[in-house]
Image (spheres, grey):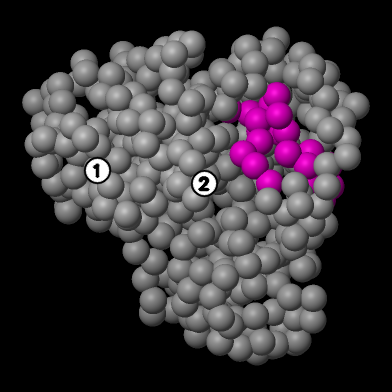
Amino acid sequence: MSELDAGQNREALRRGWCPGAWRPMPSGDGWILRIRVPMGRLSRRQAEGLAALMQAQRLDVIELTQRSHLQWRGVQPAQHTALLSGLRALGLLDGDAMQEARRNVLVQPCWQPGDATHRVARGLLKRLRQPDAPRLPAKFGFAVDLGKRPYLRAASADVRIEPLQDGWVLVRPDGSPHGMAVPLKRAAEEAMALAAWFAEHAHGPGAPRRMAAWMAQRRRPASETLSPAPINADSQALEPWWATLPPGMAWVAAPFGRLSAAAWARLAQLAPLRLTPWRAVLLERHALAPPDEAWITDATDPRLRVAACVGAPGCVQASGGTLPLAGLLAAYLPNEGWLHVSGCAKGCAHPYPAPTVRVRPDGWDWIGWGRADAAADAHWGALAPLIDAVRRSAGRHVGHGQAEGWLVR
């Protein structure tokens, strides 16, 4: 095992990086260790194995991320070797940190063995394991979204693979409404070619690290004699994802993306699990998920419409607690209303405009519509005016591409 430098300075804590299992990231309460589950699917043996590992190492909470990963907070350096060994035994650990960093492939979670999503994702993963695979920024990722219609457009990705018709798919750079129409069998190849183009051109000081930022500079691949295949506007309709699940697939949402170790152990006993970018899991071979006070199964629960980061003390940048506040304010959220509770101006839980509460040492900033780094419309040191603002926050709809972190697509 390669030890992290015990002398991480505060600047490293401030800036952070994209953590993994091999290279966890320091935070306020220890390390954040992220598990990149292959194809976003856990067998019962793997899910139960994670529960046993949490119990053995006394890890209290598991988190579901917006990239269909799992993560543990509060990991101590002395636990790292045992956790790596346990993940390796469960088939949830890459050979090294470089392989792990490359494997950023988000899949439409309702895939079935042998279908288009499964075949293309496996082809991508195979190519990303090759020694000559392009060196990409740590957060650069692919979305393989080949269901009946795209599910993942609000999820973070740089190269998107989406359905067209008659065995053809669209491979497009994030941030562009156009891409290359290719036969399904060439989708992984063309996606890797687009990633290689980005790796070749987007380097050097000040170069964008994400495809959408590169596209915003009106950059285009040199080979873009592309057939301009426009995105079908009908498929962008904002629709609850749980309304479109196939038969035999139930859902369980984690309040604010967090489940206790005990709750995860109960969940792991139910069925093989599919991870989603909506901070929820799907249960295979279940029509309905059993109720449990630790998770959400009611689509009307207002917590589904609240995004909140971990806050203090888990994050050194947070000015105060967020999760208790988010739970309290959810009860006052109007029907169809949305809310973002952020511990600082970074807005990690929801990097898009929304009605936002930003925690400050002396109270709370209220941003009627904006990101967490926007200027405050008001500031209060008492809860009563904040609750009143939340009650009156309905009427602004969170549109497509802004719902990441909430349980819509």
- Cα separation, mark 1 vs mark 2, equals 20 Å
Q: Is residue 150 above or below residue 2?
A: below
Visible in this render: residue 239? no
For image coordinates 65% across by 57% down, the residue present is: 309
Q: Is residue 266 left or right of residue 111?
A: right
- Of residues 86 and 375, the one drawn nearer to the viewer in this rendering: 375
- Which quadrant of the view contains residue 2? top right
Residue 132 in percent (x, y) is at 44, 13
Q: Farthest front residue?
A: 205
Q: Which residues are magenta?
A: 16-36
Secondary structure found at label 2: loop
Is 394 located above or below residue 379 in the figure? Answer: above
Local packing at callout 2 (Cα closer than 10 Å; few below 14, some 14-19, many 20+) is: few
Residue 346: x, y in percent?
Answer: 61, 62
Three-letter amino acid code of the residue under disc 2: Pro
Q: Secondary structure at mark 1?
A: loop
Task: Specify the amino acid type for callout 1.
Answer: Arg
Residue 20: give its label.
none
Q: Which residue is mark 2?
A: 205
